[in-house]
Amino acid sequence: MQPVKKSSKLDNVCYDIRGPVLALARQMEEEGHRIIKLNIGNLAPFGFEAPEEIVQDMIRNLPESSGYSDSKGVFSARKAIMHYTQEKKIIGVSVDDIFLGNGASEMIVMSMQALLNAGDEVLVPAPDYPLWTAAATLGGGTAIHYHCDEQSGWLPDLTDIRAKITPATRAIVVINPNNPTGALYPVELLRDIVDIARKNDLIVFADEIYDKVLYDGAKHVSIASLADDVLFITFNGLSKNYRSCGFRAGWMVVSGEKRHAQDYIEGLNMLASMRLCSNVPGQYAIQTALGGYQSINDLVAPNGRLTRQRDLAWKLIREIPGVSCVKPKAAMYLFPRLDPKLYPIDDDEQFILQLLEQERVLVVQGSGFNWPMQDHFRLVFLPHEDDLKEAIGRIARFLDNYRKL
Ligand code: PLP
């Protein structure tokens, strides 16, 4: 029999967060090793469970959830999201402009599938949440990475964005708050991006899944609130703000210059219909989540658990010689830099594999986020303080040995 090969569509598609390093970690666990996993922004395993009222609501609605819903999602959830867009001052959103998905992930893939033809380019940040690059590639387009500048707190480099626009550029992806850097963008910068989009007829894809995971009293501005003459697709969901990754409840909202986008919106409708609907119990969690007590605020309060863990992880990681790190303003990740003079790394995946083998700590290499250099890695600061101390202590020991090689 001929070997069964994967489609060539997948040739350049890459998603390293759950890639080969994770396979080794699984194998090591099967052999009985305890691994400290700092690789995935999955909250529940670290004791950040979904709020009880959301769980109770899902249980109550379960008997009503066994049928398919409307392809775009149940009305109550979409209405609650519409109110949320009003709170965020996103202009002119109706229930019809809202699509529910199995997580924001499904919507990200769908938004790219519906848009792109061969040769089309999408501007994606570097570093990025790699699903964006993967989805643009799978969608038949090309992700063109624009630089985010570590020196300026990982803000997008507008000059680089302008330089990378070509006649083939269709859209720009803005991940704010950012994974993996924890950056939160100032409104002036968002305005500049909107100007660039307006002048070059680009769609803005705004991934705002961490818009409530904000530290030090910071406020988030939705880029779609800044104009009505640019087409915006804004992505969000319950996974992070409501610690409900497993419920797979996400959405996208079409706003702004919709009149000229009717054909694209028809494409989105068609793809939403083809997968019938998203997971219905998850949809029923949305109204309660958005309308209920926002317990995330307790976690990011000055002495809240997430703030304490961020502060501790950020302090400890920078105590390691040759390691620097921008302090995250949002989300749940550190993206530290390893000084190449102290840590000359040829292949950061191998580096991360060695860390895993020697110290049983799992992180993700910077290149997994389409970062072009071999000098960063990402860790989540979700574990309790004692586990963070243990994990970062092991990273420090590994780096100490690495320096002496
Ligand atoms: N966007 C960003 C920036 C993320 O970090 C993640 C998950 O980590 C997602 C989207 C996907 O979220 P969901 O669980 O809603 O699919």
Image (spheres, grey):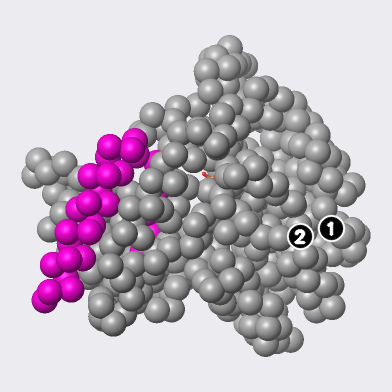
- Where residue 368 sits in the image (x, y, percent)? 39, 66
From the viewer's perspective, tell me whether residue 289 is left or right of residue 334. right
User: Which quadrant of the view contains residue 382?
Assistant: top left
Which residue was labeled with disc 1?
A: 226
Q: Nearer the viewer, residue 32 or 396?
A: 396
At mark 2, the secondary structure is helix
User: Which quadrant of the view contains residue 283?
Assistant: top right
Label 2, ligand 1: CB separation under 8 Å? no
- Badge 1 vs badge 2, beta-carbon distance below 8 Å: yes
Q: Residue at x 38, y 46 (%)?
A: 312
Q: Amino acid at mark 1?
A: Leu
Classed neighbour count for the residue bearing mark 2: other residues with Cα under 10 Å, few (<14), some (14–19), many (≥20): some
- Where residue 158 sits in the image (x, y, percent)? 69, 78
Which residue was labeled with disc 2?
A: 187
Query: Quick check: is 388 in the magenta stretch?
Result: yes
Q: Nearer the viewer, residue 229 or 177?
A: 177
Q: Nearer the viewer, residue 121 or 380?
A: 380
Please give the range of residues in magenta: 376-405
How far apart marks 1 and 2 lie (CA) works out to 9 Å
**Numbered-mark total:** 2
Q: Amino acid at mark 2?
A: Val
Classed neighbour count for the residue bearing mark 1: other residues with Cα under 10 Å, few (<14), some (14–19), many (≥20): some
From the viewer's perspective, tell me whether residue 145 is left or right of residue 306. right
- Where residue 159 sits in the image (x, y, percent)? 68, 83
What quarter of the picture does the N terminus occupy? bottom left
Compared with 400, 149 (above or below) is: below
Query: Quick check: is 63 in the magenta stretch?
Result: no
Residue projecting furthest to the left: 31
What quarter of the picture does the C terminus occupy? bottom left
Q: Main secondary structure of the magenta part?
A: helix
Compared with 316, 59 (above or below) is: above
Q: Residue at x 82, y 48 (%)?
A: 90
